[in-house]
Amino acid sequence: MKVLMIGAGNMGLTYSEGMVKSPLLNRKKIMIHDLSEGILAKLRKRSEFDVYEHLEDCLPKADVIFLGVKPYHADELMQKMKSMMHTQQIVVSLMAGVTIAHIKSGLEINKVVRTMPNLPAKVGKGVTSYTESIDVSRIELLMIRNLLDTTGVSIRVKNEEFINKSTGISGSGPAYVFYFMQSMLEAAQKMGFTVHDSKILVSTTFEGAIELFNKSDLTPSSWMDKVASKGGTTRAALDYMDDNNVEELIKEAAFAAFNRAVELGEG
Ligand SMILES: NC(=O)c1ccc[n+]([C@@H]2O[C@H](COP(=O)([O-])OP(=O)(O)OC[C@H]3O[C@@H](n4cnc5c(N)ncnc54)[C@H](OP(=O)(O)O)[C@@H]3O)[C@@H](O)[C@H]2O)c1
């Protein structure tokens, strides 16, 4: 199987770096095409990739084509690709908001998988949600799933609405966690901790809490009850958040991202 990545910026390169490790590729190199001279020059130094400046030299050879460009470059790119595509090729889109129907009609093909990646894929801890057009076979989908799993885990969702929903949870989610971390870092520094110590206090607290959560059957809410005794310090913080509606605001924020993903898809 030959895999081509078009657009090797943040996400495209992250997924390419994961996928080269896939046994499915049978040590074949990943083909990469990008327009940025800087990116091409850097990638040419790496033995695991075959780097192409021109689409016509790589696109016809590919069985699976990943689209890693920004959504606003999609139409221009598909216009260039269209005449070189053949119907057995599978296109996997990493692009937010671009629908399967739009890709099918833009490329005049039928096999499309749409994904929602997330940033921790960079460290092999990503979660990619995906859904597919009706013409993608079970075996083809299994193959795509294996490729996606090289960057962490993946979940198949039942339709594109759930791709937009996963944008609100996992796609944009790392930024919510960073938001919380930033507030705690600033609080620690305001209390007088050094930048170095604040970082250790905050990052270890996040890591520890997540490990506790992952290694037990307790819900986050049960964990909160376990650590917050009546009249104690943790309860004081949680009560303050509850009194200020923080929980509801976080839920509303996730819905704001979901709604924006829907809007971008319509635009
Ligand atoms: N970053 C995230 O956290 C995240 C999360 C979820 C989904 N996504 C999705 O991932 C996709 C990629 O985002 P990114 O942040 O990785 O973008 P990026 O860093 O800007 O990378 C895109 C690359 O594609 C190149 N490119 C543009 N037009 C091209 C064309 N016609 N042919 C070949 N290469 C072309 C760009 O070159 P130039 O710079 O020269 O234009 C750039 O090197 C987006 O569609 C986004 O919606 C990203």
Image: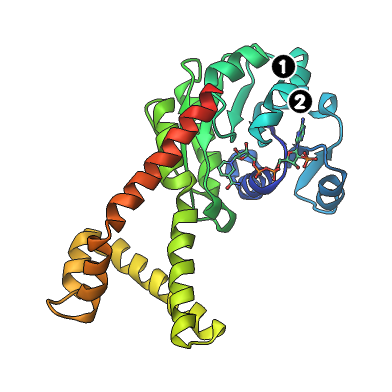
Q: Is residue 218 visible?
A: no
The residue that mark 1 highlights is: 85
Q: Is residue 179 left or right of residue 255?
A: right
Q: Looking at the picture, which amino acid does disc 2 mark?
A: Leu
Residues under numbered marks 2 and 1 in contact, where contact means CB atoms less than 8 Å apart: yes
Q: Looking at the picture, which amino acid does disc 1 mark?
A: Met
- CA gap, disc 2 and disc 1: 7 Å
Question: Where residue 209 sits in the image (x, y, percent)?
Answer: 34, 69
Residue pictured at 49% horizontal, 44% vertical: 171
The residue that mark 2 highlights is: 59
Above or below 108: residue 56:
below
| View extreme (left): residue | 230
Q: Determine which quarter of the picture holds residue 79.
A: top right
Q: Determine which quarter of the picture holds residue 187.
A: bottom left
Q: Which mark is residue 203?
A: none
Question: Where residue 87 sits in the image (x, y, percent)?
Answer: 64, 13
